[in-house]
Image: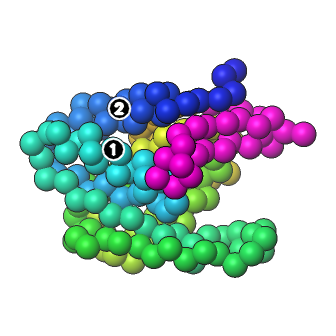
């Protein structure tokens, strides 16, 4: 199994996501909403690619900090970054975007947070990386990179805008 992915791998994965979304929704208006943090950067890159099409695009970011179900497991208080959704979510075709899909708990929290903004017509999920090991019945509609990891492995995603470089590292469990 490849243990490090670099900028070109990440760019290729984001292009794959865009191509799959285009194939399924060639002309429909899309609301692309990235989950903070890093899912929002993947979403922004995805929007840049989809903006090449002749379609209506809306972009937003979603902070799920207060919707998490693992406060007792966090080492510190959640860092609130704020959401920015300045369009009507009701009846929209929403593509929710995150960097890594693991247990599904982040996506559950994101769906709860999104419901505070209205009732989308459809919500689909795009993830840069799907590493398996679900604890909830959640699956991605679009996957950039599928990884076969061990449950206790760490998948560390670094993105240029957030971390200064594009890199994905898989750290095997100790």
User: Mark 1 and mark 2: span between their CA atoms?
Assistant: 7 Å
**Quadrant where the image shows the N terminus:** top right
Residue 148, magenta (yes or no): yes
| Camera-nearest residue between 50 and 72 | 50
Q: Residue furthest right?
A: 174
**Apparent side of residue 56 relative to residue 7 in the rendered image (left or right):** left
**Apparent side of residue 38 relative to residue 95 in the rendered image (left or right):** right
Across and down, in percent, residue 121 comes to 26, 60
* Residue at screen point 27% across, 45% down: 48
SS at mark 2 in the image: helix
Q: Residue furthest top?
A: 1
Q: Is 159 drawn above or below residue 67 in the view shown?
A: above
Question: In which quarter of the view is residue 151 placed?
Answer: top right
Question: In which quarter of the view is residue 68 placed?
Answer: bottom right
Mark 2: few, some, or many residues within 10 Å (few <14, many ≥20)? some
Residue 166, magenta (yes or no): yes
Mark 1: few, some, or many residues within 10 Å (few <14, many ≥20)? many
- Give the number of the disc on residue 128: none
* Residue at screen point 28% across, 59% down: 59
Sequence-wise, the earlier of marks 1 and 2 is 2
| Camera-nearest residue between 75 and 163 | 163
* Residue at screen point 43% across, 57% down: 40
**Quadrant where the image shows the C terminus:** top right
Query: How does the figure colour the protein chain or chains?
Result: rainbow
Across and down, in percent, residue 60 comes to 33, 64
Q: Residue furthest front?
A: 164
Question: In which quarter of the view is residue 65 placed?
Answer: bottom right
Segment colored magenta: 147-174
- Give the number of the disc on residue 46: 1
> What residue is shown with label 2?
15
Across and down, in percent, residue 138 comes to 54, 49
* Residue at screen point 65% across, 29% down: 4
């Amino acid at each position: 199994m490849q243990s490090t992915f670099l900028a070109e791998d990440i760019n290729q994965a984001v292009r794959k996501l865009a191509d799959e979304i285009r194939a399924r929704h060639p002309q429909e208006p899309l609301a692309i909403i990235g989950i903070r943090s890093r899912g929002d950067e993947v979403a922004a890159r995805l929007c840049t690619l989809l903006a090449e099409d002749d379609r209506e695009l809306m972009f937003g970011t979603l902070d799920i900090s207060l919707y998490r179900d693992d406060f007792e497991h966090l080492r510190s208080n959640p860092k609130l970054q704020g959401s920015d959704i300045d369009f009507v979510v009701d009846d929209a075709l929403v593509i929710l975007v995150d960097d890594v899909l693991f247990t599904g708990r982040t996506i559950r929290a994101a769906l709860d947070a999104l419901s505070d903004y209205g009732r989308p017509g459809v919500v689909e999920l795009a993830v840069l990386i799907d590493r398996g090991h679900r604890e909830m019945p959640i699956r991605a509609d679009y996957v950039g990179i599928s990884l076969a990891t061990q449950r206790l492995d760490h998948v560390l995603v670094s993105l240029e805008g957030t971390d200064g470089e594009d890199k994905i590292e898989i750290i095997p469990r100790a």
